[in-house]
Amino acid sequence: MEAAPRRSGRELPEGVAARQGAPEVPVGEQAPPSAAPVMQLEELPARRPGVVIKILLGLVFLLALAYLAGQRRVQALEQRLGIAQLVTAGFPFVALGLIARTPTVGILTDAILVELSPLLHLGLGWIGISIGFRFDARLLDSLPQGTAPKVAFSTGIPFLTVVAAAGLLLLGEAGWSFSFRDPIFLRDAMILGSAGAITARAAARIISGGGPHEPLVLQIIRLEELAGLAGITLVAAYFRPQDEEVSWRLPGTAWIFITLGLGAAVGLVAYAILRRKATQAESQVLLLGTVAFAAGLASNLLLSPLAVCFVAGVLLVNFPGDYKARVTTTLAQLERPIYLLFLVIVGAIWNVGDWRGWALMIVFLFARFFGKWIGVRLGWSQGELSLSPNERLVLAAAPMGQLSIAIVVSALLLYPQGTVPLIVTAVLGAAIVTEVAVQLIVRQLRSALGPGTGEGSA
């Protein structure tokens, strides 16, 4: 397997500094092929005072916008306008990142992105601990009998269809003879399959509208999230750099145990700290510091911050203690602003101009919908846990949530070369398309069923 050198954690994915349109490259000119794939901290250019002021004001504006978008009143307004699901994917903030990256605006330059790159790791860690903290073991005990095989169908089949379809496309992209000797295409297909098998949590509200099936759909989505996290953990463990610059050389299974052990150690330390009496503000600082430490340590070991912080979150929610209300409040207050800032950086490093990523998106969309439809039909069309045809339709076309985007961004940080940037385009584009499609489907179904019909009928 082609190895990647050890990274310091303050680098950008390949192509960010060299792609056409970067501020350091004159408009209309292409960066030279010899441009470095990443920009180190010591390469930061000097800035004129006017440029520095513009950048600072732009960053303050982005921070304020993310904070305001995380307020409850704004979220309630989004729900009344019917755009909450589209905003959940964060497309407006991804677009802000793209705009801020343009030479005309020049706020998120290569140098600034190097400085802000820890936000990507913090965002991944925060998403991981938020999902883990929702994974209470008591919820698994309350699952109806026969749920596990149904979830296996609705999750495993779309994973396999995406892996098969995307794997063939990526196999041809890398070159047939070379790919069989170095199966990077399989790694990338597994990343795409892990992202595609997950459904957004907000889909439960769209499908059931607060009806009797909403708790069941939420449980299905939690198990799907667990499968997606298992996928990125396996990829990070078994597709490791193997060149002389990598100091640790361990089997893939050992890296899985290191991931679990690191997450458990962070969870135990966080438990020892958080169980002590503290104010809400102190709990916020402690939790932020814990996630930042865990995410940074995981990134330096070339592991996924998602998986490490997820394990820590699972331990925190299942240990006894009266700190859980404070942690729940902290996660609810900070999850959305951190996620939106995370998406701004994602938009800035997104190479949106590569047509191959959009071609992969089309294949990914069809494979995911086909696999979801078969899996939902086989798993949820019969028995006491069956869903209505309209509910199965919406679940099959259900949008991807923040975890799907986090998985591909985590993969981009681990494997900045090759076709992983194309996977980012495929998943980000598909997230937007599926959310718009589901909104249209739900509104058409509600119109067909007549006025006064809730989303639960969809």
Image (cartoon, grey):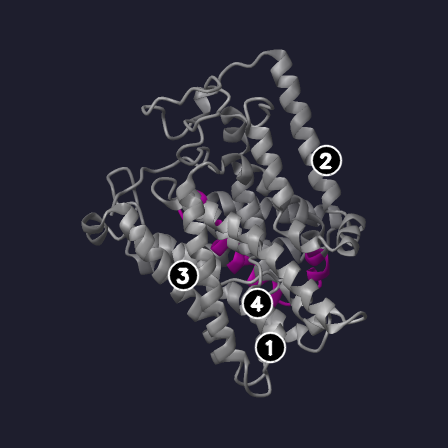
Residue occupying image coordinates x 39% and y 65%: 161
Disc tally is 4
* SS under mark 1: helix
The residue under label 4 is 221
Marks 1,4: beta carbons within 8 A: no
* SS under mark 4: helix
Farthest residue, direction bottom: 383
Q: CA distance from mark 3 to mark 2?
A: 38 Å
The residue under label 1 is 389
Task: Indicate yes or no whether the magenta region holds residue 317.
Answer: yes
Marks 1,2: beta carbons within 8 A: no
Position in image of residue 82 (x %, y %): 74, 55
User: Picture quarter containing residue 69?
Assistant: top right
User: Picture quarter containing residue 260?
Assistant: bottom left
Of pointers 1 and 4, the one earlier in the residue sequence: 4
Of pointers 3 and 1, the one earlier in the residue sequence: 3
Q: Amino acid at mark 1?
A: Pro
Task: Indicate yes or no whether the magenta region holds residue 14.
Answer: no
Position in image of residue 336 (x %, y %): 67, 48
* SS under mark 2: helix
> For this view, does 346 lie left or right of residue 416?
right
Q: Amino acid at mark 4?
A: Ile
